[in-house]
Image (cartoon, rainbow, N blue to C red):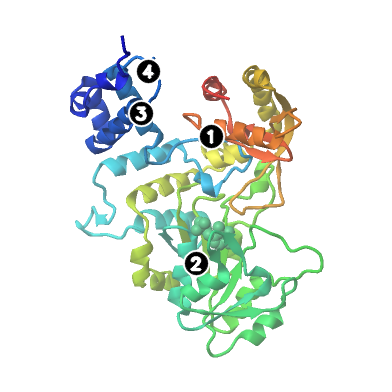
Amino acid sequence: MATEHPARKLPGVDQLLQQAEAAELIRIFGRTALTKSIRLVLDQWRNSNDLTVKAPSQTIILEQAAEHLGKHDVGLKRLINLTGTMIHTNLGRAALPETAIQAMLTVASNPTDLEYDLETGQRGDRDHHIESLITEITGAEAATVVNNNAAAVMLVLNTLAYGRQVPVSRGELVEIGGSFRVPEIMTQSGCSLVEVGSTNRTHSRDFKQAIGPDTAMLMKVHTSNYQIQGFTKSVPEEELARLATENGLPLMSDLGSGTLVDLRKYNLPYEPTVQEAVLSGAHIITFSGDKLLGGPQAGIIIGRKELIARIKANPMKRALRVDKVTLAALCEVLKLYRNPDQLSHALPTLKLLSRSPQDIEQMADILLPEFRQYLEKAQYQVNKIQLKSQIGSGSMPLDLLASWGLSISTEANKGADQKLRTLAEAFRRLPVPIIGRIHRGHLLFDLRTIFEPTEIRQQLSLLTI
Ligand SMILES: *Cc1c(COP(=O)(O)O)cnc(C)c1O
């Protein structure tokens, strides 16, 4: 008797869509996407040449459709960052403290007094909620907040220097990555850059010579992602601020990372603080909310009252302003800075950066046998290894933090690199992807970010290699 092809027994799309299991999938992915995905699965069964396979049940078809939808679902995925770079721009930078997350939830799900004055019942100012907190912590006269630090820099330049000249040291014409480069930001903001000094040495007299009738302000850029070493000279901020003031000009200082605490207190390398920049006399200072500060993506602009007022009046401010969710989170993060003694527990970024190597080594000891259990049978060697974590986001690139992790290699003579890349890919394909880095024939997992082994353990059990 001729075997009947299983395709003949396949159910129709409409019939499948009416199943109880389909209702839930429609709720999550939508009817259109589910219909498409069911068709795809049915086609696969229909095109199968294997006549011995049994026709799939409706449940199996729907499961396969769900799996396909899950794989191709849109939206941000959470993942585990074992790259060794703590404030990783591509991985979303800072994780926020619990208080910030609660505040985000509250304002996201309810109306709020974002721009409403509860006392007068009149329209309010969204910066109002945060300005006093920022000035209290930094010592600046006034403050405003925009979408990110790149926006902060553009807004300041566009407000205070549109159509005019801004001298910057040749040693500070930085590129931050992506498309943020000082010369280009300057052009896009409508200003002309006047290069001053040389790559390694810039003197006060270089700035003096550059100042003319068209000069709008002086600018200092913190070279956060590189250092010029050797025969070098840059003009200290105090001196530059004095020179600017003498010429009736403002000095803008783009700090980039902008830490609000002296990191040496937490056994971390020194990074100029925002407070120091204020004390040095800079008239306008910009810094990121989600680099060393450990908050949500934002750009913070602080400085002299009359300058901040002009910046806030620029129509571009409206285009660059932050939303209520960001504002709520930033407020809560800033409040933590009122208690510096608690900060290394309360602020996830600082907790990561100040974690002791001994503590990380313990995690490596716990996870080593687990990784071995899953990887040795596939001919991978796993070892505990001393590593150096990077702070990331261009912060202090030369200062590395002692850390521990696991190093995976393969003995395969041929195709070792490919085998390692395949393994890295398998880790990235996990339900909660685990991201490491490949370095000189080893797949490295820096465990600084792992405080508790359960989730890694679960993911390891799901690894398919
Ligand atoms: C990071 C950085 C920026 C850009 O900040 P984002 O928050 O990434 O927009 C600008 N200037 C400096 C000096 C930086 O380090």
Question: Is label 1's Cβ within 8 Å of ligand 1?
Answer: no
Tell me, for residue 428, which label it has, or none.
1
Give the mark, 4 or 1, whose residue is nearer the N terminus: 4
Classify mark 4 as within 8 Å of ligand 1 or not, answering yes or no.
Answer: no
Q: Which residue corresponds to the image point at 72% horizontal and 52% vertical from the top-left?
A: 398
Where, by quadrant of the figure, is residue 81 drawn? top right
Locate residue 353, reporting x and y percent.
62, 41
Q: Alpha-carbon distance for marks 4 and 1?
A: 35 Å
Numbered circle sitting on residue 98? none
Callout 4–callout 1 Cβ contact below 8 Å: no
Q: Which residue is mark 4?
A: 51
Q: Secondary structure at mark 3?
A: loop
What is the C-alpha distance between the residues marked 2 and 4?
66 Å
Q: Which mark is residue 153?
A: 2
Most distant residue in the right direction: 231
Name the image quarter holding residue 193: bottom right
